[in-house]
Image (spheres, coloured by chain):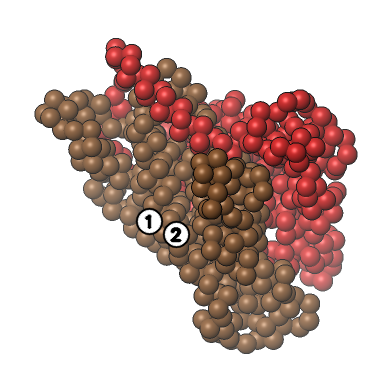
Chain colours: A red, B brown
Amino acid sequence: MASLTGSGAAAPGPAGIASPPLTVKPVSRERRARPIGRSLLVHGFILAILVIYAAPMIGVALTSLQSNAEIAARGVWHIPENASLANFTDVMANTPLPRYLLNSFLVTLPATFFSVLGGVLLGYVFSQFRFPFAELLFLLVIAGMFFPPQAMLIPLFRFFNSPIEIAGFQILPALYDTVYPMILIHISLGLAITTLLLRNFMSALPSSLREAAIVDGAGEWSVLFRVILPLLLPALAVLATLQFTWIWNDFLWPLVLTRSEESKTVMAGINALKGQYNVAWASQAAMAVIASIPTIVIFVLFQRYFIAGLTMGSVKE
Amino acid sequence: MTKGSRLSLILMAAGPLAFYAIFVLLPLAQSLQISMWKWNGLSDPVFVGLDNYTRALSDPLFLGAFRNTAVWLLVAVTVPTVLGLLLAVLLDRPLRASRFYKSAFYMPITLSLVVVGQVWIWIYQPDWGLLNSVLTALGLGDLTRAWLGDPATSLVAVIVAWCWQQTALSLILYLAALTTVPRDLLEAAAIDGASAWQQFRRIIVPLLRPASVVVISLAVINTLKGFDIVFMLTKGGPFHTSDNLAMLMYSETFFKYQVGYGAAIATALFILAIIVILVYFRQARASERIYG
């Protein structure tokens, strides 16, 4: 789900609630000898489509390597004559971009960690136990994947603009324009996908695992964290890569909940700098590239997990 | 279950459920409440019942945004779905470099819509943007225009940029689903004289039906949430020609301070999302019965 699309962002998460167990088994595909001409044709065809499809990304890369003067003279779409990384060092030195990047990490890392941890806890409870209204409660939590953020926007904006009081005593000042609201919101919104996947994952584990440990005198906490958790590592990797990507790429919440440079995340930040760098296309491109590096690195390193996470709902492995 | 066990489980569930209740469920309910207020965000709110909803039904801005969202939905469930499926069938073959091809096609899904929007601004840029440059080079200079600034093309331009990223998602989901299509079934069909098109139409498409349900549900839900790309490219303009409901909700609330009205639009979006959820759950249940 991109949703991919992200929260916002593209595709917030996969959505398989009850993936139909297909009875067919994957069949291994052997490499076959093919006529060379035909294979060249296929490669040529794919490459042609790829060039068109990737043109937007190629364009931003080309732009980021040229000087603003060269773009003003010749436009974006040519091979740069004097390719250089000057734009990158320039925007890192002369804009608040480093601060924005730091804020993005300050939001993304804890929000990813705690949304996955919450999914571990809820997934354990929902997968190992039956209790009244368990099914209904589970559906209520995973329905969160589908809720448009707009439906929570105004009350949360209002909530974080006022001091937090309990029984008339102020316990915290208003959190507006700090990184904390984004952390809290992303933890909560992430629970839907993390609970769904981890509950499914834990349901597939043999129930004797827990029973044997309980008989040996272990409590539920140590069953979960000593016995079950080590078996969840692949699922945790899947969720961590997905959550990191959605939260890093999120734009709506920082747009609404931050104002100053000290608290903007990188996506809200490069949007805010757009006016100032209105015709400095090369600088804008360099900022876009820098802002994308963390998610691209995650994707390249953990592509297997990332894809597995996106597809977990659509096909039964 | 022992008492200790029960207490542990309640403690485990309490934390995350409290977060979910405070930052998701409670705001949803409050949004419904605010949608019945006339409120500029500062002064005391006035309860006006369903006025904001009846106002929406006669507001050309709302009706326009609703129409645009409907157009968007129509494109979203067809174009990226079909393109993703065709690409998946094309890439699902034992090729040298197929891993490279796949990664390259997947890449857009890792990008923020802020970045996607930036990139497409350069494609649509009137003076030296890629689209106009290509059209001029092809001798179609008459067709060049300010794609985002022209009321006739602004909506289509925004939707195309969005479809570009959504296609990557649909491709990923279909490629995964294709691994469940048994190759010997296709080979048997080929031996029996089925053409490539017949294999595609009669074997691959029906077997991918569960994946299609997911792809289409996601396309719908991502359309309803679709705010970032509109904000980046046009902010709904010119003259609201590219507004969708998510963008209109934002501009009514944060540009015009019509907070109650904004909440009503948000509720409309929420109701549409609920409909998708219900249809999706029903589909998921139904296919469970068929396959399970």
Residue type at mark 2? Leu
Which residue is tagged 1? Answer: B281
Q: Is residue A271 left or right of residue B56?
A: right
**Foreground pick, B54 / A271:** A271
Q: Nearer the viewer, residue B94 or A298?
A: B94
- What is the three-letter code of the residue carrying label 1? Phe
Comes first in the chain, label 1 or label 2: 2
Instruction: Give the number of the disc on residue B117.
Output: none
Image coordinates of residue B2 in percent, x first then y, are 51, 46
Q: Which residue position is annotated with label 2?
A: B73
Q: Chain of mark 2?
A: B
Looking at the rendered structure, the secondary structure element under dot 2 is helix
Element under disc 1? helix
B52 w.r.t. A257: above or below: below
Q: CA distance from mark 1 to mark 2?
A: 19 Å
What x and y, as percent, mark residue B269?
Answer: 52, 67
- Quadrant of res A98: top right
